[in-house]
Image: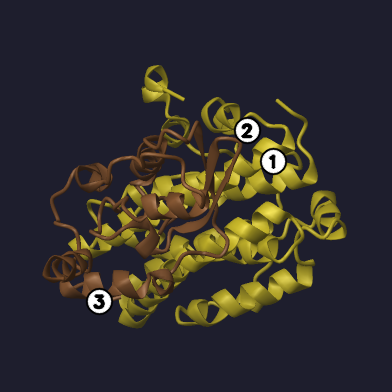
Amino acid sequence: MRRRRLKTLLAEQPAPMVHASGGRDRWSDPLPAAPVDKPGALRAALGEVLDPELPISLVELGLVYGVDFADGTARVDLTFTATACPCMDFIKQDVRDRIGSEPWVDSVEINEVWDPPWTTARISEAGRSKLGRLGVGV
Amino acid sequence: MTTPTPLSRHILTLADTKRLLGIRYSDWILGSPSIETGIAASSMAQDEWGHARLLYAMLKKQGFDPFEVEHTRPAGRYYSAPALDRPFADWADFTAAVVVVDGALSVALESFAAGDFALARTRVPKMLAEEEYHLQFGSAWFARLADAGGDAQARLHESAMAMLPSTLAWLLPGDDVYDDLVAEGRVWAAEQVREGCRNRLAATLARAGITLADLEPDRNGWDPERRRGPGAPGEEAVERARGDRNRDLFVE
């Protein structure tokens, strides 16, 4: 019980400011078998991919607009905080690497979307809470 | 290159102007009135190039090769607003361009987003959201220079007046291409563009004693192919726009 509470507490903390690209040094191992709910598993995996500038995940930041899986291909609808986001290529590579590490995923397609436009209102409560602990108000 | 349609020519008009505007803004990242204004110039340059990239990408489904469009055209085939042909001489030019050229571009984008071209409807709203910061920055600096009086006000007035007639013609070409775009439901009718222009520019320009309603578009020497006045952006700027120095390093 005590261990579980500690794990929950740690999950609520923002990631360390210094981490490997996309937080890959904290990524889980690939699932041992193909999950039944593949889109759900993909979303969970994306929940581990950290934004390069803010220590919260792409999901918490509200950048993931859709996830789908068909015929071995994972499709991710992804937006960015700005049209000229300097981290676009890093983020796409991190997404490809994290999802592509799952053995049941043959290929990854990233669909860049801009509708609806991203604003800070799309940051999740969990993301807001983590950023707040770092003194970042959104 | 694919024969341009009214839609693809309109996209080129917007994209080329965004790209050139980004270059002109970037010239002032260092050398602007303060560190903060330099950072603003950097952010705005970044935005303009981001918008240009999304606009150029729209041409792909129009049968164009985006690489060819972005990296091979000579200056004489740019559709950009003439006010950006030369570098800004000073901060008054910069400020006037944020209000006049960037402002006119935003009106054109509002018009495009309201039309029935799906890529414009889904991509342009994000651009317009980013442009709100340009509007605030430009309006604040315009008011600051206008209210200063003396040489500052005179230079600002001179800069804005030099840019306005050709930019109004660029925004409202009054040509067959524009009529086709309206008929196809791609953009606002001319009167709605004028209203958008009034809403966005009139009050700010009035701070410098400029009455927008008194101005006429300058269509002297009109180039019907590029849908702009005579001339072309300077070669040095186009070399930067095309990425000539990095040609051997392209990896895509």
Q: Is residue B52 left or right of residue B116?
A: left
Chain letter of mark 2 equals B
Chain letter of mark 3 equals A
Q: Name the residue under label 2.
A: B77
Q: Mark 3 points at which residue?
A: A137
Q: In percent of the image, x 43 and y 37: which residue is there?
A: B237
Q: What residue type is labelled 3?
A: Gly
Q: Which of A71 and A107 is in front in this view?
A: A71
Quadrant housing residue A115: bottom right
Between disc 2 and disc 3, the foreground one is 3
Quadrant housing residue B112: bottom right
Q: In this view, does B1 lie above or below B78?
A: above
Crowd rating for badge 1 (residues with CA inside 10 Å; few <14, some 14–19, many 20+): many
- In three-dimensional space, the C-alpha distance between marks 1 and 3, rounded to whole angstroms, equals 46 Å
- Position of residue B220 measured from the top left corner of the image (x, y, whole percent): 70, 50
Q: Mark 1 points at which residue?
A: B226
For chain B, the rendered hue is: yellow
Residue B217 visible from this viewpoint: no
- In three-dimensional space, the C-alpha distance between marks 2 and 3, rounded to whole angstroms, equals 46 Å
CB contact under 8 Å: marks 2 and 3: no
- Position of residue B212 measured from the top left corner of the image (x, y, whole percent): 61, 75
Instruction: Please tell me whether mark 1 sits on a helix, a strand or a loop.
Output: loop
